């Protein structure tokens, strides 16, 4: 897997508010996660995009990992997994 090129974070608050962050820096996403108050957050959505790759059908597709999480621990673990280097890198 390639080095991540873009990070997107969406925080959905219990009062209906939404905070969106899109950046090329993992540190900024980590800061936004820690900044959010646990009692006010409904759920988190994260997407890490790596760029375009050629799939098994010889088509260009966007390589990405994404998911929805209910707590910070699951979200930070997923972010760590999405950004770690693969065996073949």
Image (spheres, rainbow, N blue to C red):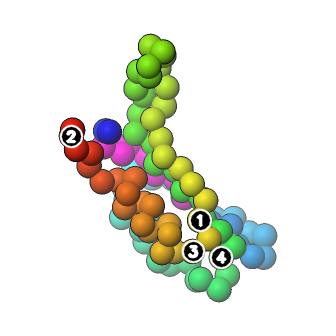
Query: Which of the marked residues, 4 or 1, is nearer the chain's N terminus?
Result: 4
Is 86 covered by the magenta stretch? Answer: no
Is 4 covered by the magenta stretch? Answer: yes
Mark 3 vs mark 2, CA separation in Å: 30 Å
Mark 1 vs mark 2, CA separation in Å: 28 Å
> What residue does disc 1 label?
69
Q: Secondary structure at mark 2?
A: loop
Q: Are marks 1 and 3 in contact (CB under 8 Å)?
A: yes
Which mark, residue 41? Answer: 4
Q: Foreground residue, 59 or 56?
A: 56
Q: What residue sits 38% from the left and 43% below the top?
A: 5
Residue 46 rendering spot, x and y as whole percentages: 54, 56
> What residue does disc 3 label?
71
Query: Which of the marked residues, 1 or 2, is nearer the chain's N terminus?
Result: 1
Q: Foreground residue, 35 or 49?
A: 49
Mark 1 vs mark 3, CA separation in Å: 6 Å
Q: Is residue 56 visible?
A: yes
Q: Is residue 28 visible?
A: no
The boundaries of the magenta stretch are 3-9
Q: Secondary structure at mark 1?
A: strand
Q: What residue sits 37% from the left and 61% below the top?
A: 80
- When asked about the image quadrant of residue 44, the answer is bottom right
């Amino acid at each position: 897997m390639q080095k991540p090129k873009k990070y997107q974070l969406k925080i959905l608050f219990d009062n209906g508010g939404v905070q969106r962050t899109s950046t090329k820096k993992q540190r900024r996403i980590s800061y936004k996660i820690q900044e959010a108050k646990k009692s006010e957050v409904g759920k988190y959505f994260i997407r890490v995009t790596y760029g375009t790759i050629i799939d098994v059908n010889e088509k260009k597709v966007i390589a990405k990992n994404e998911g929805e999480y209910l707590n910070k621990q699951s979200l930070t673990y997923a972010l760590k997994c999405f950004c770690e280097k693969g065996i073949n890198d």
